[in-house]
Amino acid sequence: MPRRATRKTESAEQQASSRGFWTGTITFGLVSVPVELVPANRSSHVGLRMLSEDGRPLQRRYYSQKTGRELEDDNLVKGYQVRKGKYVSVTEDEFERLAPEKSRDIALQRFVEVSEIPPLYFEHSFFLLPASESVRAYHLLAGAMEKTGQAGIATFVMRGKEYLVAIIAENGVLRAAILRFQDEVRSPKDVGLPARKEPAAASVRRFERIIRKKSRKSLPRDLMHDEQTLRLEQYARRKASRHKDVIKGKTAPEEGAEAVDIMSVLKKSLERAA
Amino acid sequence: MAARSIWKGVLKIGTAKLSVKLYSAVQDHTVRFNVLEKRTMTPIKQHIVDPETDHEVPREEIRKGYAVDKGTFVLLDDRELEQFEPKASRDIDVVEFVSPDLLDHRWYERPYYLGPDGDEKNYFALADALAGTGKIGIARWVMRGKQYVGALTPNDGYLTLVTLRYAEEVLSAEEIAVPKGKAISQGELKMAEQLVDVLRGEFRPEEFKDDYRDRLMKFIETKGRGRKPRLKVVRSKPAATTDLMDKLTKSLKAAQKEKKVA
């Protein structure tokens, strides 16, 4: 899917991942560590594009409902629907100014065992890279956290949204795991699951036997790939090697339709930081 | 208020079968916005356009191509694409069980509760058996035209199924190298470790609130009544510190003092 397609409900994390970097500051006591955030998850991307009848990549564009005229970015604004047909606009400047200065810092005030955080809380992750002037402070924090096996918990505001994060150190690299807030995680009671009934000991033992029998020492890695995408790609490449239905378009890049190549972004950032 | 189940399936573990219902375990409170035309404050329309002619392309004329190279596409029609769609099924196949520390949190994507669909006794028996063995199940299923891999985990006497990202979607830390700076002294490291120790505690998610969301909603409400709320000007940040040892010493003292008071 072209990236611009998500624009209507674009969230801050999508913006952060698609528009490059967000720069923030981790504070640890009086030590502050400026860092850059880059996504640690990439979307498994089917390389399918929309094309014209003669094979030109198509674009998604925005038009006024009133005049039908095409709209550029500076003619657009975010609006919150307060009732049907009535919107309140919030400008980028207002989003910025709604965040108190302190709330932009990732202030580590509590350290916990990572294993203590339930799986339900984890959303997605970013890598944190040191800004050039903070390389030592970065390694100090990463070193101390890795040695003690602790994750730092904090909230911070990034691009018009507040996040709960766990900062985790691994192999000398810091990572921010975005967590859900407690009011975003439901309990079995919230969901309306029936009250627990004590199962018969024999039934529990039967399941335990099955679990032990089917227990393995490693993950079934071969089953954990995006087969649909892989098979589709193989099929397309086979077809290409037979010169079937191949269209060589102009090399003009399709605006907004390319997937973000995180590795090339990361490499660039490292060159700058070195 | 009880939630509605979003899907029904059958857990298959070896020869055992268990009918279950899926419920979303999360509710997103993100404030959602529409993109509007600034001048008229009305929602916008989007069209698929041929950039060469600037004309809208009707849906039935859009062709799909797989980019095998930059600017080179292999055309694929709907019939060809359909053969890659997974076959619809109600089965949730539990492939194997593993120790939970084989999965790290970066795999977790979306959590669901499983609820019993009829057979409550066996549902709770499975939840207890999983908790008792300390294992999690790795499951595969097809839901709404998409193939999923998930972790079957016990949660407070109930079962949850957390969808997992595919291997391709998780970047490993080994793929990136962080620039090395001047070496950290043992003294500095020790001091930083002590500071971590002082701040050690339990994970209590109720202590962290989304204040920005409240602030944003209040702002929208005020602005919606025709008033213009005043906002502070954002100032730039002071430069980062260089004398680490000094800062650490002061931080540690302050943190220890606070702990004694608390």
Image: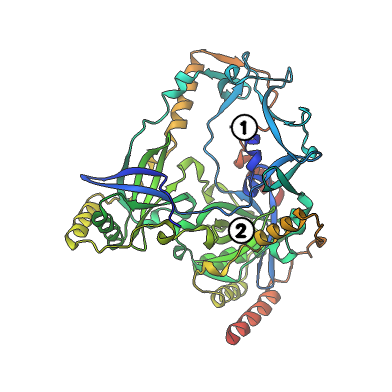
B119 in relation to B35, above or below: below
Q: Please indicate, yes or no, whether residue A103 appears anywhere in the rendered image.
A: yes
- Name the residue: 41% across, 41% down: B148
Residue A111: which quarter of the image? bottom right
Q: Using the image as rendered, state which of residue A185 and residue B240 is in the foreground.
A: A185
Q: Which of the two residues, A187 or A66, is positioned nearer the viewer here?
A: A66
Q: Residue furthest bottom?
A: B261
* Residue sitting at x 19%, y 61%: A200
Residue A163, label in figure: 2
Picture quadrant of residue B198: bottom right
Please, is residue A47 above or below residue B119 in the view? Answer: above
Q: Residue A197: horizontal and vertical position, in percent?
A: 27, 62
Residue A25 quadrant: bottom right
Q: Position of residue A26 (x, y in %)?
A: 66, 63
Q: Is residue A217 visible?
A: no
Amino acid identity at mark 1: Pro
Secondary element at tag 1:
loop
Q: Residues within 10 Å of mark 1 (few under 14, many from 20)?
A: some
Mark identifier at residue B155: none
Q: Position of residue A205 (x, y in %)?
A: 19, 59
> Which residue of the protein is positioned furthest toward the left in this rendering?
A202
Residue at figure coordinates x 20%, y 44% from the top left: B15
CA distance separating discs 1 and 2: 26 Å
Q: Quadrant of the C terminus of chain B?
A: bottom right
Disc 2 crowd, CA 10 A, few/some/many (<14, 14-19, 20+): many
**Residue at which label 1 appears:** A2
Looking at the image, tell me whether mark 1 or mark 2 is earlier in sequence order: 1
- Give the residue type at disc 2: Tyr
Left or right of B58 in this view: A96: right
Chain identity of mark 1? A
Question: Horizontal placement of A99 versus B127: left or right?
Answer: right
Chain ID, mark 2: A
